[in-house]
Image: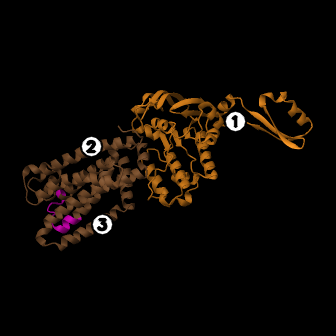
């Protein structure tokens, strides 16, 4: 019940703070670029865009959201409310992932890569949750936008580089253990899609649990004590 | 309602809050009075469960604070000294959101009306003045009708009429049976609102009593008067307890020769300075 209230609030804030407008602008831009590309490039380009944009947008948007809540001192009010850290995290991840999945689907359909709607949607949704959880963990530990952007570079490379390598031909089965690769495999309904789904669920749950711990500490730190 | 026994806490290795013990009864307004950096806000953070790395015992509503779960916050309302609001949302939007986080939900319209914000309910908080934000922040703490209210400098930055409004609401909440912890360095607020106050300096409680008893304990109530002597205005002063011994005053009274007369009690600030050697403001 409280998660539902938080989710409603988060979607409302993201709308008011212009995040949905940004999503719309990026979607139109990416789809426009897709149609400008030669037909044979579109499939890979669409998957790459879904990986690096809607799925990864959670990483950056989450940072902006948390830093905004820190600067407006809203976290102080959350810290002395009955909201549990896992409810806070769940709401944040869901709010970002729902819109990311919609945008991912729009790009995927435009690029003609959605052969299995369910696999594609789940792939984008889980990857978005995962990226958002990473964004939350980083944002909880920094206080400025510059520090956040610097901290996201290694995380971004770590998730994206193996996935891009896999997408462009480095197709080793063991690479599916990597979360970014498992997302590509699942979204493109590859031969190992079910295994990729399980891998992606594992990473997403692990990082969501970790971010819940980090948020718990962040809310405690509102009291001025680093635990 | 609140029981603190031998509380110790420090942010660093150097002791800060030391051997603090006090109790607050249900329906009482209890004030923490002290200068900036004295430990008032830290005590409030401990009582509200934001700091749990203390030693000693801190029980709020029967719960040892370091063992609290999240239902603990259904009964606690905190008005921070600074606004804690989403700036791009309207006042009503902020209240609706925070209201939705609690089991017991308040009447937003009635609360907005109580602090004169009905007409500005649809305005974004970013467009509010400092005083309006303070009032909105204050009613946000009342949304879920908590049994204990923690108010941190509730009249800070308010003009006299809004400060009056806020103090009246505090007294109304007390009349409704709420326990209120007031953290302030404003001696006038503390004298007017608090049933008891604790003087806090350097993390220690230096005195704890009713404002009246603290003032009277120093027995310094005086009568001051002026009169004409050889064409010049002179001043006289006598302790209230020794009025009958002042023959000059008796003669001036008999002959209707007083120019002015008034009693003078020390303020809580005077007593604070006397007891702690520090100034409040």
Q: Which circle marks residue B266 in the picture? A: 1
Which residue occupies 19% across, 68% down? A110
- Parent chain of label 3: A
Residue A175 in picture, x, y percent from top left: 10, 51
Q: Nearer the viewer, residue B78 or B96?
A: B78
Q: Does residue B171 belong to the magenta stretch?
A: no
Q: Are marks 3 and 2 on the same chain?
A: yes
Which comes sooner in the sequence, label 3 or label 2?
A: 3
Where does the magenta region start and end? Answer: A106-119
Q: Can you tell which of label 1 and label 2 is closer to the viewer?
A: 1
Chain in brown in the render: A
- Parent chain of label 1: B
Residue A103 in picture, x, y percent from top left: 25, 63
Q: Colour of chain B?
A: orange
User: In this figure, which residue is indicated by the disc labeled 2?
Assistant: A210
User: In this figure, which residue is indicated by the disc labeled 3?
Assistant: A24
- Label 1–label 3 contact, CB within 8 A: no
SS at mark 1 in the image: loop
Q: Which circle marks residue A137 in the picture? A: none
């Amino acid at each position: 019940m409280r998660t539902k209230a938080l989710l409603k609030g988060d979607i409302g804030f993201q709308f008011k703070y212009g995040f949905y407008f940004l999503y719309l602008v990026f979607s139109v831009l990416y789809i426009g670029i897709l149609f400008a590309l030669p037909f044979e490039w579109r499939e890979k380009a669409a998957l790459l865009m879904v990986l690096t944009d809607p799925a990864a947008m959670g990483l950056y948007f989450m940072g902006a959201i948390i830093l905004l809540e820190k600067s407006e001192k809203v976290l102080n009010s959350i810290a002395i409310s009955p909201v549990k850290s896992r409810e806070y995290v769940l709401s944040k991840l869901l709010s970002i992932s729902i819109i990311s999945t919609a945008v991912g689907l729009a790009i995927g359909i435009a690029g003609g890569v959605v052969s299995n709607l369910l696999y594609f949607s789940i792939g984008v949704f889980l990857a978005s949750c995962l990226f958002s959880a990473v964004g939350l963990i980083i944002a909880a530990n920094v206080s400025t936008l510059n520090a956040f952007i610097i901290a996201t570079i290694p995380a971004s490379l770590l998730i994206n580089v193996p996935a891009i390598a896999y997408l462009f031909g480095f197709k080793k089965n063991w690479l599916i253990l990597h979360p970014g690769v498992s997302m590509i495999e699942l979204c493109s309904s590859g031969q190992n899609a079910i295994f990729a789904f399980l891998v992606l669920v594992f990473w997403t749950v692990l990082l969501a649990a970790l971010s819940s711990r980090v948020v718990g500490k962040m809310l405690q730190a509102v009291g001025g004590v680093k635990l | 309602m609140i029981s603190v026994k031998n509380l110790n806490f420090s942010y660093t290795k150097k002791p800060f809050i030391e051997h603090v013990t006090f109790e607050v009864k249900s329906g009482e307004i209890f004030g923490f009075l002290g200068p900036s950096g004295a430990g008032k806000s830290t005590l409030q953070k401990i009582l509200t469960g934001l700091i749990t790395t203390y030693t000693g015992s801190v029980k709020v509503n029967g719960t040892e604070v370091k063992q609290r779960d999240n239902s603990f916050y259904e009964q606690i309302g905190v008005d921070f000294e600074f606004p804690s609001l989403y700036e791009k949302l309207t006042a009503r939007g902020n209240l609706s959101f925070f209201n939705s986080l609690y089991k017991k939900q308040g009447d937003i319209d009635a609360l907005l009306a109580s602090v004169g914000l009905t007409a500005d309910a649809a305005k974004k908080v970013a467009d509010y003045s400092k005083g309006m934000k303070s009032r909105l922040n204050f009613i946000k703490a009342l949304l879920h009708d908590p049994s204990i209210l923690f108010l941190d400098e509730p009249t800070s930055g308010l003009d006299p009429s809004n400060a009056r409004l806020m103090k009246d609401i505090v007294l109304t909440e007390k009349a409704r049976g709420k326990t209120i912890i007031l953290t302030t360095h404003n001696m006038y607020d503390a004298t007017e609102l608090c049933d008891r106050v604790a003087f806090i300096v350097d993390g220690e409680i230096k005195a704890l009593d009713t404002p009246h008893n603290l003032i009277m304990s120093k027995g310094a109530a005086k009568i001051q008067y002026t009169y004409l002597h050889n064409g010049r205005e002179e001043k006289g002063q006598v302790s209230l307890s020794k009025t009958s011994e002042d023959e000059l005053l008796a003669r001036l009274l008999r002959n209707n020769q007083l120019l002015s007369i008034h009693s003078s009690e020390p303020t809580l600030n005077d007593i604070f300075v006397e007891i702690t050697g520090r100034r409040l403001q």
